[in-house]
Image (cartoon, rainbow, N blue to C red):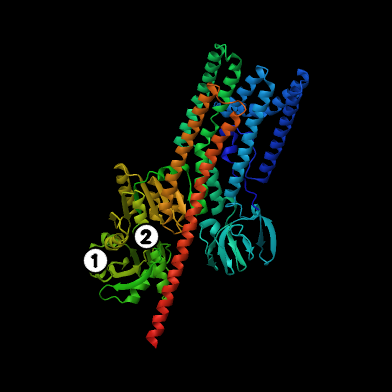
């Protein structure tokens, strides 16, 4: 199994609530440390039990007090350690109040009370830490799928087992059937089926062959493959998922900072209330003897630990839930922003459409034949990574047209490409760009565009001569219209398309899926300007895109979502969210889980404060026994943890619904294929 450092559960984070456990509970060593601490708690409890029995059978005070004092001090030490850390940080919290309560009991010679109080407080935190550790272990299953070692293949073809730390990009590793992939890479040799459910949430395996990208933590099912390494350990996609979950625990959003500031005022107020309870109780002859116990009870029952974990536990659960579905959220602020989105902006190509273009028509200008047009287009686009360029090259290959050698190549961002060959400079790209260069081609271009109406186009010039355009068609994603309807049900008021494609093409897509507005033929800076205009008018924006041109608006939006593992690196790095699948249905889910997370955080905070106020009233009036207070406090912790874990279940329910829906779609597609085959057979007969 992976040796990567495990995530430390929030409920056990001494920096947050003063837990006695500072080990990493996500690891086996963390589990063993928790068990040792439980043993220490039981040892202290045994000493207290001996002291209590000695007092019960009326033995001398010395005999009963010695084991009670030793047990109390033994159990107090972890609380003192936690309190010291809190005070040194300048943020006294739960451990500080608990330690003060136990010390106060010792000061009034209530040794057994002090000892059992420390025992119950510490034991409840250890049990809660163990509970949180179990929950985190379930989350860790997502990222504990990468083997520690890999079979590296040397130049002679022999295998050597090496640790992942010894691998470098460019190395070749061999993965046999049934094994998990140790690295991100590209298949160099072999074919197989790979189950990527751990990364994308997609249960159907994908077929891989030479040149196909594969990812660490996924499972090789059927064939042996050799993989060229592109990323190792923390640089892999699944390694980044782990780092995102870790960041969710330590992130400090505005809301968390507000909670911590509130807790900073909260502790002095609680101490003041305890002092007032002691003062007024001492003035009453009837209950004077209970004054110290009541004040100590106030200190214990109002510890703010549950309040401090109200935010991070919910965020960790939400991040883990999203990661199980292949939704990588980079910051807690992004998830918070997604809860308030009212405007969604989508790119067209690769987002609302599949991005897999096919040449639908060659539209040469007068006096130019189709082969000449396709040759020039292929020559210009051979060095481009744009989806339109790849489609043109595929068509040229099928037509047995080989791109000619070029002497110079230049890409004009958002406009097109220029390539020089011996007979002149070829420009291929947007029609508006070519008209800027040579306004005289306007009439010819208008005639050509009539032939490819409704298609995306790449216009081509050789020198000053206009050669025509290549018309390309892109299929709309099957669920695009359904996603737009779902977004409206979630309260999204405005859905827009920003695209660099032609207006007639963008309008056709917009009318089909039902958007509110279309901005077409946009350069990257124009998309950015339009987005800034929306934000300036008070719209809370979410942008979905996948191309290099989308990078600026993905970075500027309140929430930027990059589509799919195939999305460009710039888009993925600019966006606050990366979808591991090209599935638009994850966008509404992102809004839903963001809103549910906000609701659960509010519930956690409200419940923590309510239980603290009720406990304070009960303690001040003497209506709660001091022995009950640690368990009363544990109720708040348990509520926050279990309430937050509902987010994990929410993601699991969504995944189950998606699998059922995909199975139904697959079955419908099979039936349609059978029906077509039957119709063909009938026609032949």
Q: Position of residue 223 (x, y in %)?
A: 61, 69
Could you tell me residue 609's position as x and y percent?
48, 31
Name the element at disc 1.
helix
Around disc 2, counting alpha carbons within 10 Å, would you say few (fewer than 14), some (14 to 19), or many (20 or more)? Answer: many
* Disc 1 crowd, CA 10 A, few/some/many (<14, 14-19, 20+): some
Instruction: Count up the numbered dots.
Output: 2
Closer-to-camera residue (117/600):
117
Question: Which image quadrant is residue 133 in?
Answer: top right
Q: Residue at x 61, y 52 (%)?
A: 144
* Residue positioned 68% across, 56% down in the render: 162
Nearer the camera: disc 2 or disc 1: 2
Q: Is residue 281 visible?
A: yes
* Residue 381 screen position, x and y as percent: 39, 66
**Residue 392 x, y percent position in the rendering:** 39, 69
Element under disc 2: helix
Residue 349 in the image: above or below residue 633: below
Residue 480 badge: 2
Tell me which numbered mark, 2 or 1, is placed earlier along the sequence.
1
Depicted 56 relative to depicted 37: above or below: above
Which of these two is toward me, 502 or 577?
577
Residue lying farthest left? 443
Residue at the image position 21 percent from the left and 67 percent from the top: 443
Residue 399 in view, yes or no: no
Query: Which residue, given by chain and number where applicable, does mark 1 sit on?
Result: 441
The numbered mark at residue 18 is none
Residue 458 shown left or right of residue 42 in the figure: left
Query: Farthest residue in the bottom direction?
Result: 685
Disc 2 vs disc 1: Cβ atoms closer than 8 Å? no
Tell me: 675 left or right of 519.
right
């Amino acid at each position: 199994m992976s040796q990567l450092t495990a995530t430390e559960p929030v409920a056990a984070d001494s920096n947050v609530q003063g837990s006695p456990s500072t080990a990493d509970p996500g690891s086996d060593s963390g589990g063993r440390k928790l068990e040792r601490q439980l043993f220490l708690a039981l040892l202290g409890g045994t000493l207290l039990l001996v002291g209590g029995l000695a007092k019960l059978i009326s033995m001398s005070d010395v005999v009963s007090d010695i084991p009670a004092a030793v047990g109390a001090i033994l159990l107090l030490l972890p609380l003192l350690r936690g309190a010291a850390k809190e005070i040194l940080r300048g943020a006294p919290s739960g451990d500080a109040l608990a330690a003060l309560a136990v010390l106060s009991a010792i000061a009034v010679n209530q040794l057994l009370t002090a000892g059992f109080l420390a025992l119950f407080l510490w034991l409840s935190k250890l049990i809660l830490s163990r509970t949180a550790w179990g929950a985190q272990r379930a989350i860790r299953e997502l990222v504990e799928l990468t083997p520690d070692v890999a079979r590296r293949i040397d130049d002679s073809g022999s295998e050597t087992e090496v640790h992942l730390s010894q691998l470098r990009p460019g190395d070749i590793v061999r993965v046999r059937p049934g094994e998990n992939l140790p690295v991100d890479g590209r298949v160099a040799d072999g074919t197989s089926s790979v189950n990527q459910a751990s990364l994308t949430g997609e249960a159907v395996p994908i077929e891989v062959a030479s040149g196909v990208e594969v990812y660490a933590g996924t499972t090789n099912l059927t064939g042996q493959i050799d993989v060229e390494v592109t990323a190792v350990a923390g640089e892999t996609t699944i390694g980044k998922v782990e780092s995102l979950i870790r960041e969710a625990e330590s992130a400090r959003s505005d809301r968390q900072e507000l909670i911590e500031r509130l807790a900073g005022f909260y502790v002095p107020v609680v101490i003041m209330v305890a002092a007032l309870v002691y003062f007024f109780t001492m003035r009453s002859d009837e209950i004077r003897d209970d004054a110290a116990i009541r004040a100590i009870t106030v200190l214990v029952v109002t510890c703010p630990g549950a309040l401090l974990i109200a935010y991070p536990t919910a965020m960790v659960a939400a991040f883990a839930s999203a990661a199980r579905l292949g939704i990588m959220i980079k910051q807690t602020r992004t998830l918070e922003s997604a809860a308030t989105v009212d405007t969604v902006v989508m790119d067209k190509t690769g987002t609302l459409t599949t991005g897999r273009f096919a040449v639908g028509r060659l539209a040469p200008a007068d006096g130019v034949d189709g082969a000449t047009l396709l040759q020039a287009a292929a020559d210009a686009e051979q060095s481009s990574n744009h989806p339109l360029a790849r489609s043109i090259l595929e068509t040229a290959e099928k037509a047995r047209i080989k791109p000619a050698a070029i002497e110079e190549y230049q890409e004009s961002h958002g406009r097109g490409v220029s390539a020089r060959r011996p007979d002149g400079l070829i420009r291929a790209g947007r029609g508006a760009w070519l008209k800027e260069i040579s306004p005289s081609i306007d009439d010819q271009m208008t005639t050509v565009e009539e032939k490819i109406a409704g298609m995306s186009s790449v216009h081509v010039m050789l020198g000053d001569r206009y050669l025509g355009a290549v018309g390309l068609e892109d299929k709309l994603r099957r669920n695009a219209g359904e996603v737009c309807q779902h977004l409206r049900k979630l309260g999204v008021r405005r859905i827009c398309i920003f695209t660099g494609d032609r207006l007639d093409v963008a309008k056709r897509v917009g009318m089909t899926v039902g958007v509110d507005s279309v901005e077409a033929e946009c350069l990257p800076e124009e998309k950015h300007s339009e987005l800034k205009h929306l934000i300036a008018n008070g719209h809370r924006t979410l942008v979905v895109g996948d191309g290099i041109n989308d990078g600026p608006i993905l970075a500027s939006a309140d929430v930027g979502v990059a589509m799919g593992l195939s999305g460009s690196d710039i888009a993925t790095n600019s966006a606050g969210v990366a979808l591991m699948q090209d599935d638009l249905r994850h966008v509404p889910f992102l809004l839903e889980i963001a809103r549910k997370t906000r609701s659960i955080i509010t519930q956690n905070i409200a419940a923590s404060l309510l239980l603290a106020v009720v406990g304070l009233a009960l303690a001040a009036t003497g209506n709660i026994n001091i022995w009950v207070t640690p368990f009363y406090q544990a109720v708040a912790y348990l509520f926050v943890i279990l309430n937050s874990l509902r987010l994990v279940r929410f993601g699991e329910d969504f995944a189950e619904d998606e699998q059922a829906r995909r199975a139904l779609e697959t079955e419908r597609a099979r039936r349609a294929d059978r029906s077509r085959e039957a119709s063909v057979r009938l026609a032949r007969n």
